[in-house]
Each structure stands twice: as C-alpha cells, then as structure tokens.
Image (tube, rainbow, N blue to C red):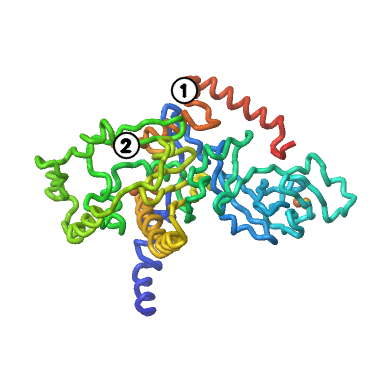
Amino acid sequence: MRIWKTLRSVRAGFPGGWEKYATGIDGENSPPFVQPENPDDRRSLIPAHGLPEYWYPALPDKAVGKAKPVALKLLNKRLVFFRGKDGKVAALDDSCPHRGAYLSWGNCFWHGYVSCPYHGATFDENGECVEFITEGPQSKMVGAKGMRARVFPTRTLKGVVFVWMGENAPAPIEEDVPPEFFDRESMVQTAWRYWDLNWMIALENTGDAHNMFYVHRNSFRMLRNRLGGRPRTPIGYRVEIVNNKSVKRLREGSGGANEAFYAGPDGKLPYQLYHPRVNGKWPKHRVRLLWAWFFDWMDGTKKRRSRFKNPSDWEGQRLPGMVRNNHHTHMYTRWGVPVDKDLTRVVYFFTSRPRNVFGRLYDRLTFNIGLNWMIHFNFSDQDYDAMRSCRYELPEYLSSTDNPVIGLRKLVTEHARGIRRTVDVLEETSAERAAREADEVLRAAQTGHRANGS
Ligand code: FES
Ligand SMILES: [Fe+2]
C-alpha cells in the first residue's frame, strides 16, 4: 500500500495529485460570512454577531464545577462562568480589569470567588474585587471602582444556564426563554453542537419551507414519511409577524391551495413528479414507498392529542434566534446562539411531558438511544451541509417560496429588541450615515474603551 502511494505521488509530482486543492486550500470549509454593502439590501443590516438585548442559553449547569471557572464565547464576547456564594452559576466579562488577563484561566480558591491567574485579583459574583492576593489584605485595589468586572446576569432553569447579553437592564426572562422552562410538568433534554456558519444563515434555514422533500429525502426521519414533510409547491407560504417576536408560516389562505398545487383529480398528491426538460422524475425511484404504508398505518392508529400549547408568538422562528415546532408528543426548539460571525452554537431543547416516573424513563431512553441522533444530527446535518455555502455577499434571486426567509429578515432588522429600525436606517442619506458613524466612533473614544460597569 505504502509503495503504491509513494509511486503515485512521484507520478503526480506532489502528494495527492490534482484533487487535493481543487477548490483552493479552504475549498471544503464553510466560506466566511461577508455582508453586502448596499444599505438597500436587508442583509447588510443583520447584526453579524447576533442581537445583544436578549437572554441566551449559555451552558449546562453541571459543566461549572467548584474549583475551576469556565470560559465561553457568545455574541463575540468572552465570558467567565463560576459559582457564586449562593452556589448558583454567575458570569463576568472574562477580562481582568487590572491588566486584561483571562479570569477563566485562574482558579476558584474560595467558595463563591474567582481569582485572576496573573496577580490574584479575586472577584465575587457582583464583579467586585474583594481581594488582591499579590498585594495582601491591605491592597488598595480591593473595592476600587476601576477594578469592577462587568456582570452578565444569569438564571438557571431545568439544568441550563441562561445569560443576559444586553447593555441595558435585563428584560423579563419569560419573554425570551421558552414557556416549558417555567412549568413543572415539562422535562427538557438538551443537545449542544456547533455549526461553522453565521447564526442568521442557520436561522433562515429553519423557516425554509421547500428544502424538506429534497434535502432530507434520505434522513431516517423522512424515510418513514410518504411526502417527506412539506409538499412541493411553486407558490410558497405567506408569513405573518406575531407580536414583534416571531415569524409564522400561514397555512390558511395560501396554505391549502399552495400545498395541494400538484394534486391530481383525485385530490391526492403524486409521489413522483415528471420534469419534462430533463425528461426525468423526482424522486427518481419509488423504493421509499416500500415501507411507507407501514408508517402511514401506524400514524393512522395514533391519537394526535397535543400535550403542548404553543402560544402563537412562540411558533415558527422566534427572536433572538430559535425555531419552535409543536410535534404534539414533544416540543422541538432549535436555538442558534452566535459564537462569532462565522460560528453558531446550536442548542436543541427536546421537551416532553411524561406522566409518571416510567414515562420519564421512557423519554430519557428514547432520546438517548435514538431520537437525539435522528433529529438533531442525522436530519440537521443535512441542512447544515446544504446551507453552509450560502454567501450573503452575492446578489440573490428569490422566489415566492422564499417568503419565510424574507419575513425573518424583516423581523430581525425591524422588530428585534434594541435594534435601530430599518426604516430609520434606510431613510438616512449616505452622508448622514457617515456623519453619524464618525460621531459614534468619536464618542466611544471619549468615553473610554473598557466597559467595566463604573
Ligand atoms: S491581570 Fe488580573 S490580577 Fe493582574
Ligand atoms: Fe431542512
């Protein structure tokens, strides 16, 4: 084998032959997120690092131990998590006000405090410097205003630590965190993973109505369903913005005619459609129908009594970056948390309502043995691979089936908390805009660059 490889490399002139860098040295990686410059293009107004004035899921509560602080980046900010006096997880800016070292590289020598690795500045959960080890107990650094670290308010719910990322006072957490986190019957199981793409591209995918039949055709989940979810249509869904919080696809109105567009005279949707220009059918084979009858029959026997009520502004895509689907037996939430402009931490909440201890056990088992993998990895990886090469900097040519994507961009740029409304930005002339930006830079320079809460 080795000899063969060596011979081949000699023949090709360099190891690997022509294929190795066929698409450049980063050819297989996700392209970086670059926004268009034209302010008339809504994509230029998307905050690349996410929407700060919201609560976000940060990390599992059990990930934060007693001896070592934990670092985590969200919305392009590096935070340090440790346990405060009351044992709850607290978060500070991961930057020591003394010389800027990472607090997360330090230690929790005493219960409730984190100490900087460099000179031992020691902070409590309120960001106060309570000791400065290398100067001893008489240190003037203790309690100094300039030594205060920025606090990020936290709240732990059902084993997940949520953090407020805003500059302003926190909004009520019930507005941002799904309702199941506040009711006693719900059990939330969580999965965490990373996608090498911008949070907004991830979120646009969640409303993308027409990839289901195509992208997921060979996912385990879809193999059992005759139509593979949403049917094909050239019309697309109309959408509605609810309470400035979510974009919902409307089934009514556009839904019926829309979904039945290709129905035959018998009212049934054909499984395969003929595409005359390529003289071929899609799907290419009928092999998936071999077992579809079984699942159709099984679904027919199930009572689809919903165990959840989803308030209407908690359906579809919801600010700051999640999608919510009511699957009756469970509630699905996928939350794209921006790490930086090119990386998204994808957090899944799989919520069920087991009736008793056996139900709990059953839900835990099915989640860990199969559902987690099937829904959050097998199915979602197909989306990831399909969408991650989308490039914002290129012009787009959209269809009416892209309505949900357009609706989402409108939601984010016009309705999100703490955002400058698009209309204001669009009405500004470019000269005014340049003047305002110059002014902002100047003001930032005057007020000092360290946000230390003083
Ligand atoms: S840098 Fe943190 S104590 Fe000096
Ligand atoms: Fe998809």
Query: Quarter of the image containing the C terminus?
Result: top right
Q: Position of residue 47 (x, y in %)?
A: 51, 36
Q: Which residue is mark 2?
A: 402
Q: Position of residue 296 (x, y in %)?
A: 22, 54
Label 2 and label 1: CA atoms lie apart by 22 Å
Disc 2 is placed on an element classified as: helix
Q: Which of the two residues, 189 or 382, is positioned nearer the viewer here? A: 189
Q: Which mark is residue 241?
A: none
Question: For the point 70% across and 61% down, which residue is it?
Answer: 67
Cβ at disc 1 under 8 Å from ligand 2: no
Q: Are the residues at dot 2 and dot 1 in contact (C-beta closer than 8 Å)?
A: no
Specify whether 421 is left or right of 438. left
Q: Which mark is residue 423?
A: 1
Query: Quarter of the image containing the N terminus?
Result: bottom left
Q: Residues within 10 Å of mark 2 (few under 14, many from 20)?
A: some
Q: Residue furthest left?
A: 265
Question: For the point 71% across and 48% down, which residue is it?
Answer: 125
